[in-house]
Image (spheres, rainbow, N blue to C red):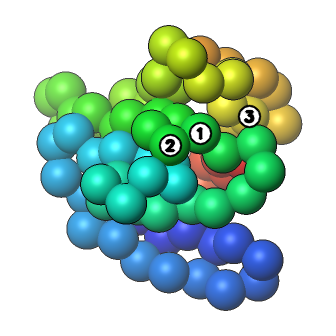
Amino acid sequence: LRLTLQGATRRFRLLDPTWLGSDPSCQVRVDGPNVFGRHAVLRTENGRWLLEADADAPAIELNGLPIRSAWLAHGDRVT
């Protein structure tokens, strides 16, 4: 996973599952005023990655559209 935040690019090795959020236990730490502790999770199935917002977190924007859950493709932008 390549993640760009505020102009800085970081790379992460994905595990199944991989949690994203501001909580120290998350494999991908993201800080911000709208980021929940465990904001979203990435899971793999048959070689594809599924991104799901945590039940308590707000929707995630994927390519500019709000989603709760979606399969990811190369070049997708998550905000």
Residue count near mark 3 (Cα–Cα under 10 Å), binned few <14, some 14–19, many ≥20: some
Q: In the rendered image, which quarter contains the N terminus?
A: bottom left
Return the mark for residue 44.
none
Q: Position of residue 76 (x, y in %)?
A: 62, 47
User: Which residue does the image show at 83% across and 36% down from the upper left?
Assistant: 64
Q: Quadrant of residue 60?
A: top right
Q: Secondary structure at mark 2?
A: loop
Viewer-nearest of labels 2 and 3? 2
- Above or below residue 56? Residue 41 is below
Tell me where residue 73 appears, x and y as whole percent. 50, 41
Sequence-earlier tag: 3 or 1 = 1
In this view of the protein, can residue 69 be seen by the observer?
A: no
Q: Amino acid at mark 3?
A: Glu
State the CA–CA distance, disc 1 to disc 2.
4 Å
Q: Residue at x 50, y 43 (%)?
A: 37
The picture places residue 58, in percent across and down from the top left corner, at 69, 23
Q: Amino acid at mark 2?
A: Gly
Left or right of 70 on screen, residue 43: left
Whether residue 79 can be seen here: yes
Give left or right: position of 10 versus 67.
Answer: left
Residue identified by numbered label 1: 36
Q: Quadrant of residue 66?
A: top right
The residue under label 2 is: 37
Q: Are marks 1 and 2 in contact (CB under 8 Å)?
A: yes
Mark 2 Cα shell of 10 Å, populated few (<14), some (14-19), many (≥20): many
Q: What amino acid type should be assigned to the residue bearing mark 1?
A: Phe
CA–CA distance in space, label 3 to label 1 = 14 Å
CA gap between label 2 and label 3 equals: 17 Å
Q: Secondary structure at mark 1?
A: loop
- Up-down: is 55 above or below 26? above
Disc number for residue 61:
3
